[in-house]
Amino acid sequence: MLLLTSAFASLPGRVVGQDQGDVRLRIALTDSAPNGARAPIIRSENMLGSTSRWLAALRSGLPVRLHYRVEVWRSRGAWFDTFERQVEWDVLVRHEPLLDQYTLLTLVGAARQERRYATLDALGAALAFAYQVNVRPAEAGRYYYAASLQVGTLSDSDLDELERFLAGDLDREEDEDGSLGDALGRGATRFLLRLAGLPSLRLEARSGHFTVH
Amino acid sequence: MRLMACCLMLTLVRPLLGQDSVIVIDPNARPIDSLVRGGPPAEVVTDLIAFYNDSATTRMQGDVTLPPGSRFEGKLALYRGSLRIAGRVAGGIAVANGTLYLLPGASVEGEILVVGGRLLRSEQVEHRGAERVYWDAAPVVRGSDGLLVLRERRRTLGEIATAKATFQTGRIRTTLSLATGGTYNRIEGLPIHFGPLFEFRPSDKSYARLDLRGILRTAGSSTDLRSDFGYVARADLRFTGSTEFGFGARLYSEVQSIEEQPLSLSESGWAAFLLQRDYRDYYEREGISGLAYFKPAAGLRVEFSLSRDAETSVRATDPWSLFRNSDRWRRNPLIDDGHYFTTGLLLEYDTRNDQDRPNTGWMIRSRLERSTSDDIAPVALPAVVRPNPPTGGGYATDRLLIDVRRYNRLTPALRVNARLLAEGWIGEDRLPVQQRVSLGGPDILPGFDFRAFNCAPEGFNDPAQPALCDRIIATQVEVRTRVGLNLGFRLPDQEGNRPGRFVGIEEADLVIFSNAGKGWLAGSGPGQVPVNRLPVLSEWSLDLGLGLDAGEIGAYLAKSASSGEAVKFTVRLQRRF
């Protein structure tokens, strides 16, 4: 555990296009297994930091969704890198004004965990948890991890749809056929919300290379 | 410090350094469909309530500070807020849904219990006694008598009210909805869909549903060519297991678009709503269809479908648009009316890692269709476009679509994507108007005008600009890399002491692309391509361009390389492909 938490200090992931002082996505590596394989540790920082724009969105009644994705890539020198596998998970945060509490729902596949926090301090600490993803490659080769974090606000209907999708009730194909709510496009609606100043952010980070023997 | 562990597929490793924690995600673990509600243990909440409600406890609320040098004897409890202690407390402390700060010089002799907040301890703090801290909110409320009581759990995140009303009767879940559907267009305006959806899940591996929707077309019809109302009734049965398979049936009366390009449905809707530019054409179809599908391997779907419908022309109306509302809409082309019996075979292979923003994988889609009709009423087209179809019965035509997309990461920072699209007639009688194709416009060949290649012969002037080609083929290649933009401005914060909300685009993909394509009539006439071959590359039209893709919006400049057309500027609301 000590090694895990100190990994961020010793092996900072390379951060692409991220403003200092704003939300950051960091990726680090665990210590090497005997064969050289290392697992990624992902952490978002400063979610409720200086600008507090996510906090403003939460307090405006908009749930905030954090969508994490970690991809395992095999480096092949001058030729195309090879995609090996990926893992995704979501964290949904919502403010309940009547209780002045924050609900944090973590979704990994069909498994969900709901927690509530009464103070911003506790919520910020919970959002700063690091995720160690056990996707160490087994085959010999040179690898790296690419992580992305998509942060955005959700309308209630988006949230409902997401819940239903995760429950397996909706086919993806239906959306392409023009299902309910598509008259002017969900993505375009989100874009207008963004133009209105509502926050949306996509961050990417990549780890250093490591070699599996 | 004690922190409750996550339990799903997640494992929360208990922290050793301050409040730092690591959640372990194991994607190889067996999937479990579960909902775990975290929270402090019941006995801890009981202890908290008992401590707070004890008549010997001094109760406070909000932000309270015990300054250096102060001394408090007895039990101290705080509900909501922050308790800052820099003095001496001889007794226990409980904080419910608040934060406890032990500031330099603080001394506490007694148990510390914090539920629903953190304990932030400075250096030079003295504490003798037990310490229990739970970050999860305490499910308690303060009653009118000032005492804490247990609060019943409120609705979960997934139970948030939406525009839809859902209720359960036995094992059947019913959803009543009233929402917009389809896309904004010059035929229907903004179609409103309404009706119930019944869902039945007899087991974990089977799912059935019946979706009944009425369609109200808000752009009233000025003619009797179509009704202001439509409907779609759809039944689906799905079985999941080692191999997923399913069946479906539809009964419909709906407006259908002719081509799937040059823009997606939502983008086409926005162009129509904002700019009175509808990039698609439409017809009405009324009939019944059925399908069966199975998924023999991950990402692979095989589907067989049958349909029998009446297809009729529809006329453009005059729905409202935000800009250029006084302009005239482009006419909607007439189609070859008639009853059609269509059989289709669809193959899909999708290994993309993300459907909206893929970085890797294949997306291959191929559809083979055979349509027959005994009462086709063809539109008069120039003989060079097609010979007159047989109208007394026996009309049959075959059509093929192949769409292959490959997404690659070349280096950690560079992605290269490519697409090949081929579509059109492959045999028997020539295609009806509603199945013909074209190229040019913001999607596949953005360096050229809308339908620059629609195969209309010289002298054929139809203001509807119908797609008349027998076949098209196109390739698209793009290179993407992520760049920081900070394109926008930051609003001043209301309190004026820190940066405010950023309005604009902070990061985007820089996209460099090239497209090439050709639309043609198959035959041996002048300007036509023989039926049994593809056009040589020198006959293809080529464009080059670059742009910025910020996810929800992208802006591109494209210039044709094979003709003298001006540079085209395109705004997209999704990825190019």
Image: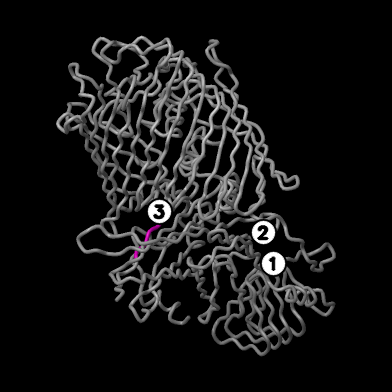
> Mark 2: which secondary structure?
loop
The kind of residue on which mark 3 rests is Asn
Q: What stretch is highlighted in magenta?
A: A202-206
Circles 3 and 1 on the same subunit: yes
- Residue B439 screen position, x and y as percent: 30, 28
Q: In the rendered structure, the residue with mark 3 lies on which chain?
A: B
Q: Distance between the residues labelled 2 and 3?
A: 38 Å
Instruction: Examine the structure image and report whether residue B440 is included in the region drawn in magenta.
Output: no
- Residue A114 screen position, x and y as percent: 62, 62
| Residue at the image point whose x is 19% and y is 16% from the top | B525
| Residue at the image point whose x is 55% and y is 51% from the top | B240
- The quadrant holding residue B569 is top left
Disc nearest the viewer among 2 and 3: 3
The image shows residue A158, relative to residue B326, as above or below, that is below
Q: Earlier in the sequence, mark 3 or mark 1?
A: 1
10 Å crowding of disc 2: few (<14), some (14-19), many (20+):
some
Which residue is identified by label 3? B353
Which residue is identified by label 1? B80
Q: Viewed as shown, does residue B506 lie left or right of B237?
A: left
- Residue A193 screen position, x and y as percent: 50, 42
The kind of residue on which mark 1 rests is Arg
The kind of residue on which mark 2 rests is Asp
The disc placed on residue A100 is 2
Disc nearest the viewer among 3 and 1: 3
Circles 2 and 3 on the same subunit: no
Q: In the rendered structure, the residue with mark 1 lies on which chain?
A: B
Circles 1 and 2: CB distance less than 8 Å? yes
Given the current orientation, which residue lies at the most extreme front position?
B394
